[in-house]
Structures are given as structure tokens and as C-alpha cells.
Image (spheres, coloured by chain):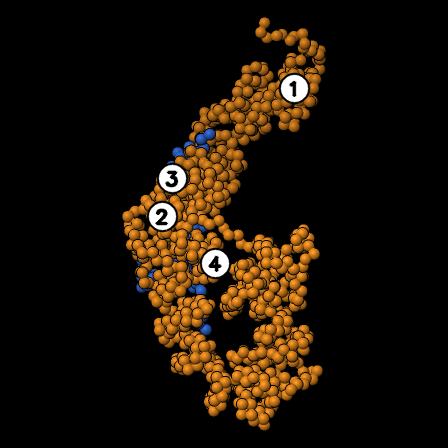
Amino acid sequence: MRVKSNKETKLPHPPVRGTGATVPVPQEEEVRDLLAKGKAKPAVELAKEIHKRCGWPESEALLVDAYAARIQSLWKTGLQEEAKALFELVHQRYSCAAARLREVGVLVRASDGNLEELLRPLNDPALPQEIRRTIEKAIGRHVFDLSALAECAALPLDHALRTAAAALVRAFAAVTTGPIEEATLVLPEVSHRGPLASWKILLCAIAYFYRQDDAACEKCLKTVDPDSAPARLIPALRTMLRARTDGRLAAAADSLVARVCGSKVSLERSLQALDSAFKTRDQGKILPEIQRAMTTCEVAYPQLVERLRQHISVRALQLELPTKKVRAALGGASTKNAYFWRLYARSLENSREPVGPVTCALWEQFRRHAVAEGWFGENGPEAAALYLHMAVLLLEVPVDTLEELESNFAEQFSGFQAFYEDQPPAIRAVEAKYKKRDLYFLSPSKLFERACSIDPHREAFEQWLNWARQESDWRVADYVAESWHRAIPNHSEPLLYLMESAEKRAALTKATAFLEEAQKLDAVNPEVRRAAFRLLIAQAGRHLRQRKLHLVEQDLAALEALPQAQVGDRPAFLVALRWACQVIRKDARMGSSFLSQIVHLLGSAAAATLACENAGAFGGLTPADFESHLPQKVSLDLSDSLVSATARVCGLGDDVGATFTIPTAWHDRLLQELTNARGRLEDRQLEMLGKAALRTNQTELAYAASVAGLEMGGDAEARFLLLRARALPEWEFERRNDCIAAAVELGRRRRDTSVINEAVELRRGRRNAKRNFFDWLDFEDWHDFSMTTEQMQAVLQREKHSPTFPTDRSDPFRVSFSRETMFLDDEDLENDEDLENDDEPFTLEDMARLAAEMGHARGRRQKRARRDLPGQGDLF
Amino acid sequence: MKTERQANIRLNEDPREILGVPPDAGDERIREAYLSKVKENPPDRAPAAFERIRDAYEVLRDPRRRALHMFLSADPHAPLLSLLPASKQERKFTGPEPWLAVLREK
């Protein structure tokens, strides 16, 4: 026998007669508990066991109930086929199943499309509410065919469901066929609480969609029950609204999107996917997306294919993706026209890498193609603007880095030939036109010159002249100023520059000629007036040095006639020059008279003495010449401020263009007063005091001036950082570099080009000067001026909180920010046996090693792996 | 006091598109388009639109700024989607069948 009888194991049915009560099944509660907890599978297993043991109608009912729960659970997890198969099996096997599986049967039949089976129970007025609700729920969720519902014979013709479905069918056809009236969607037949309510909302969404009212459409989509049958259309509608969708659409939805919107929406989705793939920088994800995007683009937007290919090429070049694979995915090489080169140049510009020459080379390629394609003329203002743009790009690279980059580039660059493979003849012809190698784009000078000769204007010449002023050879800047003057003769700036330059070289006749020319152009210009004053002062100084006193008198008379000579303390300086004349004439009486005038004008004997000393030095007198004409000892009352007087005279020196110094004998008193006089001096005077102190190597005094200046804060902070840089001892080279870099950054932010120029000159001057041992370290550790805001602030705060002049080399300055770790930290020092108990490792080898370690520890900008120059490898 | 005003249209905006002029339009054509757009969007009724139109005109009428805009407006990092023209998309009426097909698809 194949099926083993288990009659002998079954429990006898308990005799319960006449009570009508059901017989309690052993462990029934346990099964019901499991069902209540949603554990249908173990419930079925247990119920099966129980029924196997009992075999009673009650145990069978319990088992069928467990199966019903199991069928529902399968249904909910999307296993409709399995649920249906189990339902059929249970339905056939157990006699009580028909009644007990009625509810779950509704679900199964609904999925079957067997609407009649599903709906027929609704005709029964005595149908329990629970089952009615289940049927309606099933209609809402599983009835996708409204026409079938409208024509379902199981319900009477005038049944509310059939009427509502028929109305929806008509409205659906109307809304998808053409513009509709508002009234079409009123649909009073469809109850907003009924099972078809979501259909009504969907139709509204579709209507808004076609009216291009995307916000209203989206609002409707949000109210559609996500479990309802019409919700299946939501992803397609959202895609058509350009909203993001998770995953790809099914075939029918894709087809709907393509038919309604063309394939543009598919292209949008492909482009979004490609953008996301690029963000991952993962070749495995990028390449398939490139291919997909290109295929979609060819279908949806053929006119965009080339442009898309160019954009993808540039992105791939940036990520250094394998050429052949990218090219294959693109379906060919992108066209290397002006559009491509501009895009590529911009991508390099944005890369924040020191790639000035390469970027300029790319802009040159753009220029060639743009001219050939008629974007602009070879000598048009656009070409000039481009030359200027390229020059400015080169100026952003630190001078030394630029020199290195330029020489590397010139050595390695062999053109962009690789880019022109597989290019149309018209594109190749452009490149072929420029056979002669011309690397003019590596030279800011040549770029400026081209820009200014095509489109001469003030801003371009100013930029060129600012660049030229940084060159050590004065003739470069003079050439620029002369070019400017030739191109725009009515500008006074080049004449003033030429005047200043000639004055610096003591070519005063030449300087005067330039000044006269400038005065003819614009005599009331404050700069011209100031220049006239300074030039006359310089001329008087020269005549004094030549002992041509009658000419000095003429100069002074001319000076006194100038209104600008009456401003501030300038009259005091003119009197000081007259005093110098009397010293030469050995006229003690007149000298004394002039000295008294100066005391009166400056309000201080000390200031007058200092002004006279400096005026004398300006006129070529030695201290021996004038010592008998000045008080031997400056007497100062306690209430007098030597530092105020000195600062005032130093400010005057700067104003008249003379180089003033401070007697070293005043050092201690000045230092002491400066510490107490903070806040009482003007920032300009303080700065000049510091600079004057530096001229006689009074670095501690200059440092104290920088302390007072930094304490004042404000716009002059950058200048006092530079003063601090100058005042620091030689061995504080790292700190000095930080101060200069922070000053440049502050100057950039405040658009103070004079600070930037001064900083550049300071670095240049240091580098061009004869080097000592520390300069050698400095040179090796040269870095650019780039600093983040945080780093700049850190340096500023550090310097503000460093009021003491550094004197102890064994107590090196430490910093608390990450850009520079100037010296080995304590731990390093402790662990370094060679340095233990040895303050100064002063063998050359030790120093070189230390310098190397320091360079490493500072975390200098890592040189990036040298990538091939364009044109050297395979390209897209 | 008359001060020089910096145009503040974004780099990725095409000033020619704002004024509705073709790429090869000359100064005269640009000016005409500007005046016509200003008439449509006077500053008292549409201040934002007017600002945009004026900015676009200021970029286009100065050859240097026009040139700089030409160089710098290329954005290799812009989303690729921005390559597509921003016009309203076409929405074709297809009848119910393609819609119902989505509903029927399992």
C-alpha cells in the first residue's frame, strides 16, 4: 500500500452530544497565536500535524484557516502563482475549504482576471461587510481593465461599479486623445471613497500633464494610492515630467514615454545616468553609460550627438580614461573644432593644477580654430581678449614654477598631432596651416604685446606694466610704458611711470621732460601734481649734492609755489633743505633760524633734528658736515614722545620720496616708547618707522613697529605682515615665507596690488641677492604664495600673538596649523639620536639633511605625477 | 552719479538667447532686439526680467566682455543634461492604448 494508513494513530473524536458546542482541538490556541503573529508557515506545519493526529472536522477547519493565512502571505510577497496553486490544492482537498477560503478566493480570482467570480458576491445583499470590503479592495488594487469591469455580466447593468467604470473608460480615452474640457473630469459616477477613486485622480494627473501644468500633475500623482492599479502609471508619468525615477522603466512604460515625449526623456535619463557614472570615476560604470547615452542620443537627438561626444571626450581626458575604450563607446573620435578646444582649455583651467603653459597651448588651439570657423577675426577684439586671458593665466603661476613649467613644456611639447587623427579634412587643414612651431603663448610679455597691439586700452596696458615692473631689468617696464604712450598718447600713466623710472636712475632731465608732457595732458591730475612735487624735490636733492646752491634756491622757490607743497609736513622738509644749504654755506645763524622754524613746524626738537639729519643726508652731507649745526644731544622732556616724532618724520620722508633713517642711538628709547605708545600712531607712520629702522639694521625696532601695527588691525595688516617678514632674523626663513604668503593673500582679498607687488619684490630681491647659508635653505624651500583663508588667518593670528622679537635660535618658532610644520616637533627631536643634546647640527651634511626633513614635514604641495602633455599619447 | 555696473548674468546663460538674437547678429540687430525686449518687459512691471535683459545687452555691447563671456561660458563640468535645449517638451496625444498597455504589463 502506497499510502500508509494512520487510522490507528488518530485520536478518537470526543463525544459531545446535544450541546452544539465545537470540540476544542488540542494546540489550537498555539496555531491561532502563530497566525496572529503573521507566522503563517509554522502555523500551517503545526495545523497539519494536529489534523494528522485528530482528523476531526474541527482540526480540518483549523488547517484550512492556516492555509488561508499562508495563501494571503504568499500573495502579499508577490508570489501570486504560488498562492493560486496552493489555493486550488486546498480548495480541492478539503471539504470545508469552499466556505473558509472565500475571502482569499476573492484575491486569487481577481488576479485571474475572472471578474465575474470576483464580483458576483456583490449581488448578495447579505454579503458580510468584511467580504464586501475585501472585494472592493481587490477591485481597487487588481482591476486594471476598466472596460472589462464596465461590461461585467455578473453585475446588473446599472450597478454603481459598472457605471463608474464606463465613465472612467470614456474619460480615459478623452484625456489621452486630445485636449479636454474641465467638465469631462468631473465624473460624478465615480465616488471618491469607492474602489475606483484613484483612477479619477490619475485622469486628472494626465490632464494636467498634457496642459504642461507639471506641478498640478505631480500633486495629483502624490494622492494616487500607491497600491492601487492605476499607480502603475506613476513611474512613467514622473519620467515624462523629468523627475528622477529609481531604476529603469518596463518595456511598455518606455514605449509610452517614447510615444508621448519622443525619446527625449529617455535621453535625459541616459545623460543623468552618465553624469552619475562620471562622479564615481569608475571606468567600469562610465563606459557602458557612455555607450548607452550615445545610442539614445542618436535616436532622440541626432543633432546633439557631436556636441555630446565632445563633452564626454573632455571629461574622459580629465579622468585619463583609456582612449581606445572611450573612443569605441563614443562610436568615433569627437570633432576637434573650436568648441572642443575651448571646452578642454576650460576644463584644465578649472582643474586647479599648475598647468599654465598647457592651458595656454589649448587656448591657442581654440584661437586657431575659432578664427578658421569665423567665431572672430584674427585681429579682432576677441582675439585680443583671448591673448590677455592667456597672459593672466600665466601670471597666476608662481614665477619660478612658471619658468620650470615653461622649459619642461618647450622640451616635451611636439604639438597636438594625435588629436587630429580621424578628423575631417577641414579640421586637419587648420592645424596644417600652422607649420612653424611658435610658443609665443608661453611668454606673458608676448601675449600682452599682442593683446595691446590689437586692442590697446588702459586695463590691458596696466596689467602688462604691472607684470613688467616685476622684471629686474628696468628697460622691460620702460618698453611697456613707451608702447602704452605710443598707442594711447593721451594717457598720463605711462608718462608718470617713465618719469619715475628716469628719476630712479637719476636721469632727472629725462624725468622732467616726461613730467612736462604729463602736465600738458592733465595738469590737475593729483598723481601728476604729486609727481611734479617729488621730482622737484629730487632735483633739489641733486643740486644740493652738486653744491649748486643757486639752483637749489630756484628749485625751492618753484616748490614753494606749488600748492601741493603746503600739504601736511611738507613745508618742514623744504625748510630742512634750506637749512642744508646754510650748512653748506657754513652760515650758522641762518641755519639756526631754519632749525627753529622746523621745530615750530614739527612741534618737536627731536623731529626737527631728525628731519634736518635726513635732509642733510639727502643733500649728500655727512654727519661731520652738519654736527655743529645741530644740538649735540636731543633733550626730551618726559612728556615728549620720541617715537611719535620719529614716526612723523619717517612718514614725511615717504611722502617726499626721500629715504630716511633713524639714529641707532635712539634705539632703546624708541623701543621702550613703542611698547607703551601703541594706538597713538598712524599706521602709515608706523610702517615708515619700521622701514626706516630696517635701513640701519634695527630689526628689533622694526619688529616692534610690526607688533604695534598688527595690533591695530584693519586694512594695513598685510603691510605689517610684510614689515614683520623683513624684520625677522635670517634663520626664521619659514616664518618669513609664511608672513609674505599671508600678506599676498590679504592683498589679493583687499585688491591691494601694491602689497602684492611689494611681496613679490621682497621675494625676488631676496632670491637675487647674494645668498648666505640660510638663503640657501630658503631657496631650496621656495614655495608659492598660495594660501587658504584658514591658513592665512592662522598666520595672522600667530603673528599677532607673537610680541617678542625672536632671539633664541635653539627655541625655534612652532606653528599650530597644518600647512607648515616648520621645525621638527618635540617628539621628532627626542627620537632623533643625532640631534639629541645637540642644539645646532651645524655640519653642512646635517643641515642639508635637516632641510630635506623639514621640506618633507612641511607637507609641501606634492608634485603631481607628470601626465603626458597633450599630443603625446592616444587621444579621443 | 553714473557708475559702471557689472552685468551679473550667469556664465552658463547665453545673452544672445536672452535677447533672442542669432549668433551672427551685429551691433545694430542686438540693439534693436534689446529695445524690443525692454518694451515687452519694462522695469516697472517686470523688474527681474528687465535686469536680465539689460545685463545680457551689457555683455553683448562691449566687445571685450562679449569675448570674455564667449571664452568663459563653456562649462565642461555642467551636467550633460544642460546640453539639451530648455524648451518645453512636446507631449503627444496617443490615445488610451499605450497607457493601458502599461497597466496591463506585469
Q: Earlier in the sequence, mark 3 or mark 4?
A: 3
Badge 1 crowding class, 10 Å Cα cut-off, few under 14, some 14 to 19, many 20 or more, is: some
Counting labels gives 4
Q: Which chain is blue?
A: B
Given the image, on which type of amino acid does mark 3 rest? Ala
Alpha carbon separation for disc pair 2 and 3: 16 Å
Q: Which mark is residue A46?
A: 1
Name the residue beneath numbered marker 3: A328
Give amino acid for label 2.
Phe
Residue to which mark 2 is pinned: A419
Q: Residue at x 57, y 63 (%)?
A: A773
Name the side, left or right, on which A457 lies relative to A866: left
Q: Nearer the viewer, residue A661 or A254?
A: A661
* Mark linked to residue A401: 4
Estimate the x, y position of residue A536 in percent, counting from the top left: 47, 84
User: In this rendering, is residue A573 above or below A697?
Assistant: below
Give the amino acid type for the residue marked by disc 1 in the picture. Answer: Leu
Closer to us: A368 or A263: A368
User: Which residue is depicted at the point 62% across and 81% down?
Assistant: A645
Asked if residue B27 lies left or right of residue A389, the reply is: left
Residue at mark 1: chain: A
Q: Quadrant of residue A771?
A: bottom right
* Chain letter for mark 4: A
- Tell me the SS state at disc 3: helix
The chain whose colour is orange is A
Q: Secondary structure at mark 1?
A: helix
